[in-house]
Image (cartoon, rainbow, N blue to C red):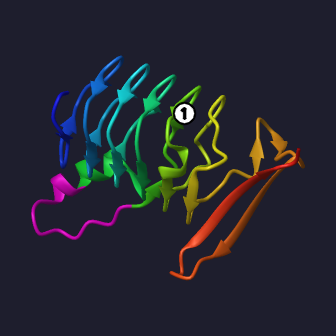
Amino acid sequence: FQGAADFLWSRFQGEAVFRSSHFETEARFRTTRFRKEVSFQWCTLAGKAYLERIFLSETVKFEEATFGSAVFFRGPFFAAAADEEEEEKGEGAEAIWEPIPPRLRFENVLLEEPEKARFEGLDLRETTFAGTNVRQIEFRNVKWPRTVWFERLAASARIAQWVGEDGATRTAVRYAS
């Protein structure tokens, strides 16, 4: 993708495979609907990447992806079935969407500018960051799992939350040396 890729209100009925793709500039996925699994494996997002208010049915994989600039994941995310229910009710019907914890897999992801990565308003209970350095990522108003692999979070990793001056809940992950 040489120019900006904007998937605003796009719908993917089958599996969405961006595997090994190269996004040269911005990639925007806002209010995008994915009915099946989404793969960004081995993908390079050289410019800013935005994923906001997404409708999902299955897992989104970012395994071994590279983010070269700012990354914004903003929730809530919703079940793709909620989108279908709205269509059945017709235009003008009031939609009530329940946020879901998206299944996001950030495994061995390279963030070239981790200080420009932000996760906001997301339920991260079903998300993994295995092999990904999250130390400089900003987490705002997120929900964390209480256990990892059926074990309580390790004492060597402490998660601190506080309310910032703008009223948003901030989260910091601190590791014992």
Magenta residues, start to end: 86-97
Quadrant position of residue 16: top left
Q: Is residue 83 left or right of residue 58?
A: left
Residue 91: in magenta span: yes
- Residue 28 in which image quadrant: top left
> Magenta region's main secondary structure?
loop
- Identify which residue is drawn at 38% across, 23% down: 43
Q: Is 8 drawn above or below residue 169 in the view shown?
A: above
Q: Helix, strand or loop at disc 1?
A: loop
For the N terminus, the image quarter is: top left
- In the rendered view, does 175 fall on the left or right side of 83? right
Q: Residue 29: x and y, percent? A: 28, 45
Of the pair 63 and 49, the residue shown nearer to us: 49
Which residue is under mark 1?
106
Residue 53 lies, with reference to residue 126, above or below; the image says below
Q: Residues within 10 Å of mark 1 (few under 14, many from 20)?
A: many
